[in-house]
């Protein structure tokens, strides 16, 4: 071991692989095998988590080669992203220089491991030869109406100063910074992933080679809800408030209407100082659907009421911080006896709690601190009494439709993917805003739109927005003055199609060669962390579906088998300034207290 030289080992392994033509394409072989590990973010040095991940893939790839398979086992770098930008700011380096230096270091370390990786297939998402094609894909999705821009309330990370997708908000906090996420109204780019909600849900049943845990996580995130919409008429100019509910059987237990802080009905009292203060507080801490249900329930009582559609009864309208405008209709009827969230709200604001479901026919129940959410029979509900919950749902939906005050409805928890990021180190969005007000794509012949090298991180806000010249351009078709889009793409876009690029990484004319993609896809064995169960894996499935028709892809699912390898855990350390340090550089001080 004294004479051990990793570079010599690397050289010997590389010579062995080349001599034995490990990487020569053997299309004459009937059997192919595409082995892929989730590509790494180039953070500086590989760690044992990387070693575990890539060793597992290497074992499988070599086993398949020895059994006569034509094997694709490539490597690349998930090289754009916020950490590079933050590290560059801290270390006074350009993000590109920092990233390329890290790639060089990690590539050398991976080669020293002697892994049978085909380095001829190497890709890097920050390379213009990669993101040029990503810009082409964006243009394609824009033309298909899948990529679009709208003004909406988005998840704002106040530490990273950027927008986050719903999937990047964990329990109300930013997935990287841990900051409490706020709601902010901005014009942002979205991808219409909800168009594929049902297909994404149904296809989960076909993924027999995936862990059941991951399939369940995706199923719950997509969140199919079957229920109905009902119109409640308010006492303000007979304005309708349309609510969505999955429990129409409990409509006789409704004791309040709750609407989102940004619901259109709030326009009627938006200038009230008390409401303005409440809305600001509510939107700052509303987070996402999952987190809002855990937050303290806050309400603003409006001066208005609605009429109960089946009773001679007025129901107060509240604005509530746990109602989201992007779920259902942004309004619900609250039935405190049979929903824990509604019960907490009702107790706080002294609202009626009316039991309408009982485990036993015709027997009332007492609700104290826990809502009754189990199955049973309907009580206190006029024509629904003594029906089972399921029969009552069918009966009330039929009555609602007959009286033309609503209809059955299926919705999904999954929301469109917000892909705009107010950062420099990412793929530029190939869009221009012309002086005549028209939004136009940059022509494909002018791609890639590259990032400016001279960038100033000293000013707060989006560095591209603050750049003195980069954003100013001209429309090549009309000669009109134009402004470039200064937001960049979410880095999860980069990783949502890289497995297709690996099939033909030298392709110049298109993002990938369709014949090569149809030969290699799907990935036969995919290996990576379970932490990507919703983010990366869901987005990759969506991209494959969205591109399937355009590129005549034979597959609709990108990954046939998935292995989530677990994590290698070890204590980590940072300085007071947030710089990572090795454990060996940390001195543990023990304090001994003496008492008299």
Image (cartoon, grey):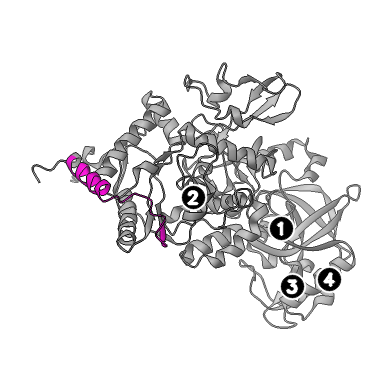
Q: Foreground mark, 4 or 3? A: 4
Could you say which quadrant of the image residue 247 lies in? bottom right
Q: Foreground mark, 2 or 3? A: 2
Q: Is residue 25 magenta?
A: yes
Q: Foreground mark, 1 or 2? A: 2
Image disc number at residue 534: none
Residue beneath disc 4: 398
Check the image and report above or below for 120 versus 220.
above
Residue beneath disc 3: 356
Decide which of tag 4 and tag 1 comes sooner along the chain: 1
Residue interval drawn in magenta: 8-33
Residue beneath disc 1: 350
Residue 157 percent location from the top left of the image: 54, 38
Q: Is residue 576 magenta?
A: no
Q: CA distance from mark 2 to mark 4?
A: 53 Å
Confirm or deny contact between disc 2 and disc 4 (CB under 8 A). Answer: no
Decide which of tag 1 and tag 2 comes sooner along the chain: 1
SS at circle 1: loop
Residue beneath disc 2: 516
Check the image and report above or below for 28 versus 585.
below
For the residue pair 180 and 300, the one nearer the viewer reads as: 180
Decide which of tag 2 and tag 4 comes sooner along the chain: 4
Residue at x 72% of width, y 76% of height? 390
């Amino acid at each position: 071991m004294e004479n051990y030289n990793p570079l010599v080992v690397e050289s010997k392994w590389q010579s062995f692989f080349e001599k034995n033509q490990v990487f020569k394409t053997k299309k004459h072989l009937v059997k192919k095998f595409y082995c892929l590990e989730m590509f790494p973010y180039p953070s500086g040095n590989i760690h044992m988590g990387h070693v575990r991940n890539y060793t597992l893939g290497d074992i499988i790839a070599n086993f398949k080669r020895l059994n006569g398979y034509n094997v694709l086992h490539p490597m690349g770098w998930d090289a754009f992203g916020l950490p590079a930008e933050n590290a560059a700011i801290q270390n006074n380096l350009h993000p590109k220089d920092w990233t390329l230096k890290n790639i060089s270091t990690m590539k050398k370390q991976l080669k020293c491991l002697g892994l049978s990786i085909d380095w001829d297939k190497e890709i890097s998402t920050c390379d213009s030869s990669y993101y040029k094609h990503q810009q082409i894909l964006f243009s394609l999705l824009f033309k298909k109406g899948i990529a679009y821009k709208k003004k909406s309330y988005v998840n704002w990370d106040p530490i990273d100063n950027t927008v986050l997708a719903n999937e990047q908000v964990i329990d109300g906090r930013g997935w990287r910074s841990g900051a409490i996420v706020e709601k902010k109204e901005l014009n942002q780019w979205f991808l219409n992933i909800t168009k594929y909600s049902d297909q994404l849900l149904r296809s989960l049943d076909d993924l027999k080679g995936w862990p059941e845990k991951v399939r369940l996580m995706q199923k719950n995130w997509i969140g199919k809800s079957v229920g109905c919409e009902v119109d409640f008429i308010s006492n303000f100019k007979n304005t309708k408030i349309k609510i969505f509910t999955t429990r129409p059987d409990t409509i006789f237990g409704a004791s309040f209407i709750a609407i989102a802080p940004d619901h259109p009905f709030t326009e009627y009292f938006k200038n009230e100082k008390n409401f303005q203060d409440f809305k600001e507080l509510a939107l700052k801490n509303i987070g996402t659907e999952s987190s809002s249900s855990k937050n303290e329930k806050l309400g603003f009582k409006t001066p208005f009421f609605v009429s109960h559609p089946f009773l001679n009864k007025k129901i107060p309208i509240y604005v509530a911080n746990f109602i989201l405008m992007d779920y259902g209709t942004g309004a619900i009827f609250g039935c405190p006896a049979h929903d824990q969230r509604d019960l907490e709200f009702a107790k706080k604001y002294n609202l009626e709690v009316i039991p309408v479901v009982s485990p036993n026919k015709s027997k009332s129940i007492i609700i104290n601190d826990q809502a009754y959410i189990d199955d049973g029979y309907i009580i206190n509900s006029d024509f629904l009494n003594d029906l089972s919950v399921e029969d009552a749902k069918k009966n009330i939906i039929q009555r609602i439709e007959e009286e033309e005050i609503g209809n059955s409805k299926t919705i999904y928890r999954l929301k469109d993917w917000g892909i705009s990021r107010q950062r420099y180190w990412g793929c530029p969005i190939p869009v221009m805003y012309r002086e005549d007000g028209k939004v136009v794509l940059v022509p494909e012949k002018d791609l890639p739109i590259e990032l400016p090298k001279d960038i100033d991180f000293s000013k707060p806000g989006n560095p591209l927005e603050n750049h003195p010249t980069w954003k100013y351009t001209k429309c090549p078709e009309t000669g009109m003055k134009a402004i470039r889009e200064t937001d960049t793409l979410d880095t999860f876009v980069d990783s949502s199609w890289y497995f297709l690029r690996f099939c033909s990484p030298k392709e110049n004319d298109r993002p990938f060669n369709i014949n090569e993609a149809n030969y290699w896809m799907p990935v036969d064995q995919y290996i990576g962390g379970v932490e990507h169960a919703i983010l990366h894996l869901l987005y990759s499935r969506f991209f494959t579906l969205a591109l399937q028709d355009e590129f005549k892809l034979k597959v609709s699912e990108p990954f046939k088998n998935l292995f989530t390898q677990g994590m290698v855990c070890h204590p980590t350390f940072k300085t007071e300034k947030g710089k990572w340090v090795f454990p060996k550089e940390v001195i543990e001080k023990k304090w001994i207290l003496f008492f008299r």
